[in-house]
Amino acid sequence: MDILTIALPALGEALTLVFQPTQLMYLMAGVLLGLSIGVLPGLGGIAGLSLVLPFMFGMEPVSGLALMVGLIAVIPTSDTFSSVLLGIPGSSASQATVLDGFPLARKGEAGRALAAAFISSLYGGLLGAAVLTCIIFVARPLILAFGLPEMMMITILGMSMVAILAGRVPMKGVIACGIGLLAGTIGSAPAGGSLRMSTYDIPYLVEGFQLVIVGLGIYAIPEVISLLRQDSSISSSGGLGRGWTDGLRDWWRNKWLSTKCAAIGVTVGIIPGLGGSVVDWIAYGYAVQSAKNRDQFGQGDIRGVIAPESSNNAKEGGGLVPTLIFGIPGSGSMAVFLGGLALLGMSPGPAMIRQDLDITYTIVWSLALANVLGAGLCVLLSGQIAKLTTIRFTLMAPFLFMMIAFAAFQSRQSLGDLVALVGIGIIGILLRRFDFSRPAFLIGFVLSHQAEQFTNMATQIASARFRRSFEAGIDYIVTPITVTILILTVLSIIIGLRQSKNIRENIDTYTGGKRAPFVFLLAITAYVAISVADAATIDRFGDKVFPLTVGIVTLIACLAMLGKMMRRAETDDLFIDLEAGGTDGAAPHGLWWTLSWFLGLLVLTGLFGLIIALSLFMVAFFRVRAGLSWLSAVLYTAAGVSFIVFLAWVLGREFPPGLLQDVIDMPWPLR
Amino acid sequence: MINLSTTRRKALGLVAVSVLAMTAGAPQMARADLSGATVDFVIPFSESGGSATWANFFAPLMSQALEGNPTVVVRYRPGAGSTAGANWFAEQTTDNGTLVFGTSGSTQFPYLLRDPRVRYEYRDWTPVLASGTGGVVYLPADLGARFDGDMDDLQDEFFIFGSQGATTLDLVPLLAFRMLGLQVEPVFGIEGRGDGRLMFERGEANIDYQTSSAYIRNVQPLVDQGLAVPVMTWGILDNDGNVVRDPTFPDIPTFAEICDATEGCETEGVAWEAWSAFFVSGFAAQKLVYLPGTASPEVVAMYEAAMAGILARPDFAEISAAELGVYPQMIGPAALVAHEAAITVSDEARQYVLDWLREDYGVTLE
């Protein structure tokens, strides 16, 4: 009965909320932004949402939601371009598409691959939205049954996904997740306020790191730097090839595969923490396993495009389930999305589903609509987008640096934001280089706070109840829900470890000498050891137990791996070093030399403030690195700087000041 | 990149519609007139809390009332339990009235307890408005049925209370529970009072309190359904400084009344003094608007006139009741008195609270 009295009216109300000219414009803006970000290789939902997050302030909730949902919904659609045309995953959600999409493009059938991919994306996205609608409704009466122990178990279930993300060496996944968890504990403890790995003399650290900074540092910076080092355009031809109608027909022939893969996408998306980086691999693996004729896979089998593309749009609908119902992010990009919801004055979780069902359902409509718009636009714009990939990346990089620096600064409006961004960026670059799972790091970071909070609070309540009577305590901890989730967790670890061999973040790997990977691991071990020692000095038990436990487990993993490294040969997967071969190894520009450009921008900002620093940096970069004439360099710089000034002016934002601004009082935007 | 720029510009052009903000340099002025200027109303909290509601309620009214009708923009500088924003404000030297700062009990308590994060001094600043609020304690229906105007019958019950931390505004209820002799086990770590209410609704906590506006919005429905029973308010201060019933909840007794009726709870002595001091700072003068100490006398006079103008609006009682509840808004000398009360506790009261925090919760502020 509830369906008729509550859900349908709410769905209808949500529909009228979304179909307002302003909301549709925001949705369109989000879709266009998402398309652009998806097209750029390596930049996905986390980077895209991190860029718009600072601008959520004071927006009307439905508009802000439309903008964000529009953006995340279409990234898995448009990221297909770079996977198919360039052989570089457009975002982590389209890695598996490369395997068969790129060979198709080389055969001159890029159009066919893209058409099949877009229709699969559309289908998967709509299915995901439909499932989300149903689950939100079904879950409503159950929400009050989810207390702290249940939430704690869900968080642990999310963390168990690290098993599948760990890649070739499970130990590396444990270490990456462990340092992510430890990074999340930096600052004052949420419960008692004790300081961990920070001091009041550096106020920036006391608050801990913001997700925006960590997301940009771990994902965006390493990818931008890596592309910049190649110093080439992303693609050389800019053509599409033939076969659009063939692609549609291919999809129709494989509609059951598409449906099954979309179902996989939704399911994987629902499990917190798993998110985008694996769902395409699981779907691809399923397509290969279930196929009768397998020899074309890897050489341009259209099923290898349909399977991952159906699943990766569907996962957004699934990922929104835990995000909206429990306020637990389903993936890295959902974690950023949660931050955006908070800025809109909404607190996702039981209360939102119960009280603001209509607003919640606007998300469903936005999701469905964005998928339709996204697929349509991708088809319409595909000719132009294919040309965009012929621009030299060196000419795009300064604009990306500019946006990244500006977005990062909005997080806390302190120069510390930029320092933290570069610091975490370097960690991201090294994690990527030595093949430590970056999604595992991010899952650790994102779940750290809630894992600690839920565990602490559930323990406090449980011990208070145990003190009263044994039954009262047991009743609280052992419920049908916690037991079910515990079983799921164990299953997910077992299946994850078995499947992890098929799931690879970096496709080709190389091993070099032993020294570099060994030194990096040694540095990690040292940091973890210091964290453990630091946690041991905290007086308040509730504030120390989580970092201490996580630190000790991570330390054991580090030591075990160091031991293994001493025994194994240097060609072992333990010693993967992307600098040793492949595109990174052969890049014309050195890693540190390229990074030092970004460092230079940071130092200049510290001295002169962002706008002056940006002008100097961009002119120098275009002239020296890109080899443009002085005139073009100045013109490009003027375009970039006036764009950012316009943006800040429209939004009423400040720029980072430097030492110069302490001495001289300057007019906006220089101050 | 060209494509990226255009799309982003489109997106942001849209955003521009909803955001008035423009921070182009305010002209330096000799007279106190803010024509064409932008006033930053900075609060050390995020966009989602009660302080944001309060600041956004006053910002447009200030814009209308201030000389020259400047644009008043609310800016958020959250962090470190609001001490980060307050430390930032302490360094500002704006003297032309284009910067005001809003604090709350969460900014006052660390100052009163001499938290090491505090690098600000309230006495450097000039208060122009002080707003009060209240709070209501409630119990689940089964325990509420055993409540008869005193806490004598509930002494053997085990209570669980979701708390944001012992040094936050929750200090006031925690101390009250202790004075009443209740065996309350606080569960620390919730991130807002809303989480505490959810724990109460799920049956994990069995005592809770909410500030007035949240109580009216979220707990009153539970009371109407028979799921919760209100037991006491903190009350408000009358003009002589006595705690009297909260006019927003005239039927609910105050903590002082319950304490008088409960065996072993005293409304005099050092514990009561300490509770009163923190109650006044945390609720009776919960939110204050400050100008930097460097503001010129003309600017201070202009703000005082503007605040008086806002409170004198014929519709003020109506619009503020909906957003803020029926609580005193103090200006001029009254704001100074409230400011003084909010930032003063006797050394005995502070020491009593610090000792209690250390003994009961192991919290030290060093």
Image (cartoon, grey):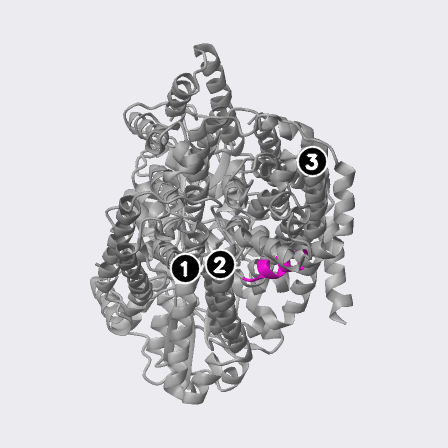
Residue A668, quarter of picture? top left
Mark 3 vs mark 2, foreground winner is 3
Number of the label disc, if any, that sits on residue A500: 2
Q: Which residue is mark 3?
A: A109
The quarter in which the C terminus of chain B is drawn is: bottom left
Secondary structure type for disc 1: helix
Q: Are marks 1 and 2 in contact (CB under 8 Å)?
A: yes
Inspect the magenta stretch and tell me whether residue B50 lies in it.
no
Give amino acid for label 1. Answer: Pro
What is the magenta segment's predominant secondary structure?
A: helix
Nearest the viewer among A419 and B105 is: A419
Vertical position of residue A338 compared to residue A615: above or below: below
The numbered mark at residue A170 is 1
Q: Position of residue A590 (x, y in %)?
A: 35, 30
Front position in the image: A592 or B178? A592
Q: Which residues are magenta?
A: A262-271
